[in-house]
Image: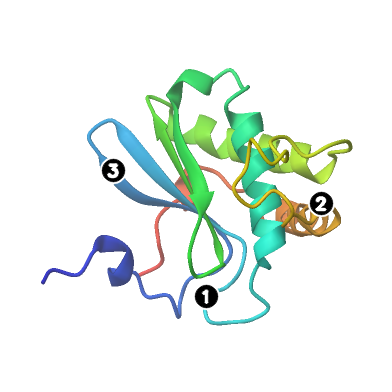
Amino acid sequence: MERIASFCVDHNKLEPGIYLSRIDGDIITYDIRLVKPNTPPYLPNPVMHTIEHLFATFARNSAEKDSVIYFGPMGCRTGFYFLLRNVEKARAVELIREIFQKIAEFTGEIPGTKPEECGNYQEHDLPGALEWARNFLPVIADWDETRLAYQA
């Protein structure tokens, strides 16, 4: 069986940041890595769940909402995948930074946390999500499209 592309990235060299994971036609998958792989602490499930709800909501309410395909957590609990169509790479990085800033400053009720809206509506951690977002912002503060490549 062929190894999938993401398993071909040397996770021992991967640092937190934003990477171009793959291009499938006009869809670009971004690897938003908050944690250095194989280096705990990993993102706690309730934190990941809250970031997922907030990021997806902000992305789907942004000027690029019609270009958003998917946002979701990695099973390894080190980050997220963000799939976009027809968005310049520089704008994608800027959008990711803008959304993490909104998450870091968020107050109020987490969107989509009623039992009829979410299959695990009780497992959220807003203070934890805010903290992880605040800690990630300095990592991506100067990130741009020239830094999207995985390190060889």
In primary-sequence order, the first of circles 2 and 3 is 3
- Labels 2, 1: front one: 2
- Which residue type does callout 2 highlight? Leu
Image quadrant holding the N terminus, namely bottom left
* Secondary structure beneath label 2: helix
- Which residue type does callout 3 highlight? Ile
Relative horizontal placement of residue 24, taking residue 108 as reference (left or right) = left
Extreme right residue here? 107
Relative horizontal placement of residue 12, taking residue 109 as reference (left or right) = left
Residue 133: percent from left, percent from top: 74, 52
Question: In the rendered image, is residue 132 in sight?
Answer: yes
Q: Residue at x 64, y 32 (%)?
A: 57
Label 3, label 1: how far apart the Cα atoms are = 22 Å
Residue 122: percent from left, percent from top: 74, 53
Residue with the mark numbered 2 = 126
Badge 2: residue crowd in 10 Å (few <14, some 14–19, many ≥20): many
Residue with the mark numbered 1 = 37
What count of labels does the image hold?
3
Front residue of 103 and 18: 103
In primary-sequence order, the first of circles 2 and 1 is 1
* Secondary structure beneath label 1: loop
Q: Pointer 3 and pointer 1: residues touching (CB < 8 Å)?
A: no
Residue with the mark numbered 3 = 23
